[in-house]
Each structure stands twice: as structure tokens, then as C-alpha cells.
Image: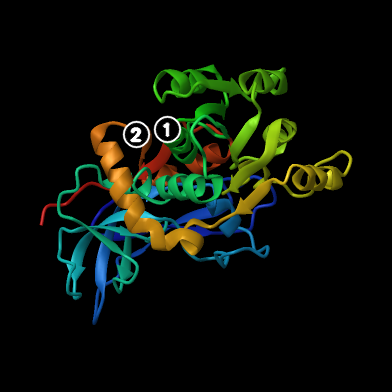
Amino acid sequence: MTQTNKTNRQWVLAERPKGEPTKDTLNLIEEAIPVASGNQMLLRTEFLSLDPYMRGRMSDAPSYAVPVEIGEVMVGSTVAQVVDSNIDGFAPGDYVLSFNGWQDYALSDGKGLTNLGKSPLHPSWALGILGMPGFTAWAGLKQIGEPKAGETIVVAAATGPVGATVGQIGKLMGCRVVGIAGGAEKCAYAVDELGFDACIDHKAGDFADQLAKASPDGIDVYFESVGGKVFDAVIPLLNPKARIPLCGLVSQYNATGLPAGPDRMNWLMGQILRKKIKLQGFIIFDDFGYLYPDFAKEMGGWVESGKIKYREENIEGLENALHAFIGLLNGENFGKRVIHVGQQIKV
């Protein structure tokens, strides 16, 4: 199945998953391509971002955002090309950072879209290093982590689009950076390519001991996106007045209940109190959206100069999106996972 100018493929929510999403969670259907009218434009999706937060949108549990309803198109950020436009400032052939979701075509009134021009050098990067993941790393680390030169930063999911960026910014700020990743290949990449001082494989039997040895002066900033056993190993190593930017808990997204074992909430709260730890969750555009222009300018300069490296995993075909998303939740991705939905059209 490939993108055409005849039909609009859509992944729609078929059921609310209990635990890990399955092949039955979404249905791939076909509909007619919508027609732009009035103050609208028709967008053709070229790239679809896959992100862990999407698992939460499949659930109807209380959250910071409304869930996707059964039968609705699955949400997601996209880079799309304008096919037809009745809106000033957007012309056929322009690329836009948009929110088409998991489908080939969508209508838009232009609100909330960013025009990327007709020939962006790396259009899909607007979904990664120059978009939400990069912004999450930049703002979370700077605004909440507030690292100082010489301090130790530990970052979970160290080769993912957020973690890899956090670590590289930390090095630019003069910090010792210790990454946590799954597998020897990812850990080697964090050290050899991204410049981390160390990277620990969370799959190792002595993971907690290795992390302690790699953090001889304790941990001043822990950038959290995973939770679970990784957070368990970090907590005892946190220094007084440590800071924890919290942007996700991917290890818990498929959980159907609380983990087995004793209730350690009081112990954790005691650690936070006695060490005066700052732990702050954040939703990037809700909390720091006003800083996006500053981020875009600084990150754009770092990427252009080669100070920040970026790895993208490009998967061909909208039809492969669900399988790729399930793999993402299981940590199979190596870098930012993007679906290449369709080919550029000449206007």
C-alpha cells in the first residue's frame, strides 16, 4: 500500500488497549480525499512522528490532553505538503509542520501550523531535533535542570531523540554526562558518537552498581523519561538539591496496575524532603511554549555547526506505523522514529 492521489488512508482507534497495543488497537481504513473549501487548505502528509505520548491518547484515563475517541484518526505531528490552499501565507508546494495524525491527507485552517517553505533541507527534522523532542530536551534541562559546569547529569533513554539531545547540551554546558540505554550498541553510540562520559546498559544484571561507579560524585540532574527500575537505581545517588525534569514514564505506559512489591512512596517522599530534591513534571508547549523562538535559534545554530548530532530512524510506509509504534514502546528504536508516509510532489 502506497500513498496515492485517489484515496486517503487513515489509522483509526478501534479499541482502548489493556496493556500493550496490539494489531487490533487501530484499524487501517480508506476514505475519499477531502476537498478544501472556504478558509481551508488540503495537506498531504509526507512524514509522521511516532512518540511515546501517543499511548496515553489511546486511553480514556484522566490526562493532560483529551483522548482519541473510538473511530477517530490517531493523533500525531506531521510534516506535510500543501496541495490546495485558500489561505494567505500558504501556497501549493509549501511544507508545513502540522498535526494531520496518522493519515495521508487532512484539511487545515492554518492555525498552529508552521510554514517550512518549499525546500527545507531536512523536513523531517522539524519532528525531532528542531521540533518537540529537541525542545523538550532544551527547555527541560535548562529551565528545570539548571545544570552548572562540573555537575553530573544522568539521562535515561540516552540515545532517543530527547535523551541524546539532553546529554549533548549537558556537555556543551561543561557537565559530566552519564547516559542510560538498552544494549551495548546504544551505549557505545552515546559515548563514541555523542560524547557522553559514560553510558550504562540498563539490561545488565549489575546495572545499579555500574551506575553508582559511573557517578562517583553523585547525581545533580536526572532527566527522567523512563521510570521503573532505572529511577529506582538513580534515587539513592541523588545529591542534595538535585533536580529532576520529568517529561515521561515510558516503562509504565502499558501498565495495567501498580507494580508488585512493597509500597515505597513514603521512602521516596523522604528522599525528596531530606535532600531537598526538585522534581517537576512538564508538558513542553503548555509550560515553555513561549521559549520556542529562543530554542529554535540556539538549536538551529548548534545543529548547523555540528555541535549537536542527530540520529533519525526512517521507516517507509504508513501501513507500517502501528507495528513501528509498538516497537517504539518496547525500546526497539535507535534514534528518532519517523514514518515516511509519501513522496514529494512537484507543484
The local crowd at label 2, few if under 14, some if 14 to 19, many if 20 or more residues have their Cα within 10 Å, is: some
Residue carrying label 1:
168
**203 left or right of 303?**
right
Looking at the image, which residue is at 32% across and 57% down? 293
Disc 1 marks a residue whose amino acid type is Gln
Image marks 1 and 2: residues in contact by CB distance under 8 Å? yes
Q: Quadrant of the C terminus?
A: bottom left
Percent position of residue 169, x then y: 42, 36
**181 left or right of 115?**
right
Q: Does residue 47 appear anywhere in the picture?
A: no
Sequence-wise, which precedes: disc 1 or disc 2?
1
* Nearer-the-camera pick, 164 or 12: 164
The local crowd at label 1, few if under 14, some if 14 to 19, many if 20 or more residues have their Cα within 10 Å, is: many
* Nearer-the-camera pick, 271 or 27: 271
Percent position of residue 151, x then y: 55, 32
Whether 105 is drawn above or below 346: the answer is: below
What secondary structure is marked by label 1?
Answer: helix
Disc 2 marks a residue whose amino acid type is Ile
Looking at the image, which residue is at 65% across and 21% down? 216
Disc marking residue 308: 2
Q: Residue furthest right?
A: 262
Looking at the image, which residue is at 46% across and 59% down? 288
